[in-house]
Image (cartoon, rainbow, N blue to C red):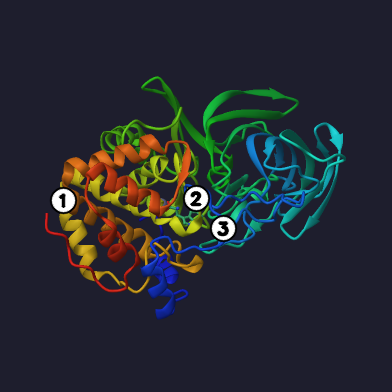
Amino acid sequence: MSLRKSDRENGRRGLRRSAAAVLIAALLTTACTSPPRTPTGLPSGTGGADGVGAEGIGDPYFPRYGNGGYDVGHYGIQVRYDPATDRLTGRVAITAVAAAPLRRFNLDFTGLPTSKVTVNGQPATARQEESELVVTPAAVVRGDFTVEIDYAGVPQPIKAILGDGGWLHTDDGAIALGQPESASSWFPVNDHPLDKATFDLAISVPEGLSALSNGTPEGTTTADGWTTWRWAERAPMAPYLTTLVIGDYRITSGSHRNRPILTAVASSFPADGDADRAMARTAEVADFLETQFGPYPFESYGGVVVADPRISYALETQSRPVYGPSFFRAGSDSTWVVAHELAHQWFGDSVSIGGWQHIWLNEGFASYAEWLWAEKDRKISVQSQFDDVYRLMDWSIPTGDPGPANIFSGAVYRRGALTVHALRLTVGDDAFFRILKAWTGERRNGNAVTADFVSLSERVSGKSLRPLFDAWLFGTTQPPVPKP
Ligand code: TRP
Ligand code: ZN
């Protein structure tokens, strides 16, 4: 798991659910009643019935995350950042579709002052209310619309469950990173995985520094001592999967299977050290995972290793994960974390959760990928890894509804991986890998929830699997290991 052990254990010590709450969760496989649901079981997040977009998208775990009433299609982001003053100047151009006529809507934004806000090219008013930017257009918005926002200021970190996310100022630059939210620290956004969008980014930094982000590198231009780095992510991306890393980096770029691959390691790491060696195996690990999960889902590959010790984790930022420094120590095997973050490209990034309750669909599979990779690379059988974790597991927190304080706990990561293997033992290898490939294929670029995975597994395997998932995801006592 890519959380440091101490972080994971702290997470587990968080909110314990009452026996009654656990029982209810066990009875209802998808334990949410409000808000309104679409046929897929995802919150509709529509809002807008009264012409006002809702201030949250309808996630019961984080009611203020995201916004209702519209769906973003694309973000065009231009930012300039000067590490000498910590000041960010930004312009974002959003294209979106209103779900209903809107006389007002919200964006998530942590409060950099705005200088100009237009909707469909007309001046609009905007006021900041805590972490929401409330926009009132000159005319009611219907159907397709555009929003342009100019802003500037010193971006701030966001307090998160696990380490601070959002914008961090570093010695030589900055790192924008974090989960379950981070994007709103540096651009106005509908910050929830239910509203995935395509992105292009142009980032200007003092000449000599690198500005790394998601997706395909589109080149750099330099003028007047500033270099602009361009990036394009053409597959829909959840906003928390955006990243921006500015500083002094050693970049390696090339192509792999006709796609661009770009990795970067903070220049303060020794050249050809453990970090560079792990990044150099990115393509090999991705190719292995492709044999297990189906075709690699994105247009580019990569990874960035940062040196700032405050980044005590890695994050699966789309097509280019970011890794903290602690994973790379001389003589240690650090490819397990690469396997974890690259597995998220399928599980989490391409197929994204429909709400934070369902986070095991990301972390359970990414943790399982560590076991698959260790079996392939180091001949440690998946079964023996399962046995070790199964024996020591604490079963008190239900994986499928861990509660907001426990979304990054061992119940989600390790018990999630145990659940994946219990499914494999139940349906057999052939059906198991067909399930994984059907999931990543059918749900590619979309969102899904636990109930979707259960029904897909039943359909592909032809077996009734509800009792299995109820016990492994929602029970609070040790389930028996299925007999193959
Ligand atoms: N999802 C990350 C992983 O498993 C770990 C993580 C949890 C994280 N919370 C975070 C990373 C906050 C960055 C910030 O790989
Ligand atoms: Zn993970």
Secondary element under disc 2, as helix, strand or loop, is loop
Asked whether disc 1 touches disc 3, contact meaning CB atoms under 8 Å apart, the reply is no
Query: Going 43% across and 51% down the picture, which residue do you hit?
Result: 449
249 vs 484, left or right, is: right
Distance of mark 1 from mark 3, alpha carbons? 38 Å
Front label number (1 vs 3): 3
Whether residue 240 is visible to the viewer of this picture, yes or no, is: yes
Secondary element under disc 3, as helix, strand or loop, is loop
Foreground residue, 461 or 482? 461
238 vs 329, left or right, is: right
Residue linked to disc 1: 381
> Residue 92 appears at what percent x and percent y?
72, 37
- Number of callouts: 3
Residue linked to disc 2: 354
The crowd level at tag 1 (other Cα within 10 Å; few <14, some 14-19, many 20+) is some
Whether residue 17 is visible to the viewer of this picture, yes or no, is: no
Residue linked to disc 3: 59
Q: Earlier in the sequence, mark 1 or mark 3?
A: 3
The crowd level at tag 2 (other Cα within 10 Å; few <14, some 14-19, many 20+) is many
Q: Can you tell which quarter of the image residue 415 is in?
A: bottom left
| Residue closest to the far left | 484
Foreground residue, 349 or 195? 195
Q: Amino acid at mark 2?
A: Gly
Q: Quadrant of the C terminus?
A: bottom left
Secondary element under disc 1, as helix, strand or loop, is loop
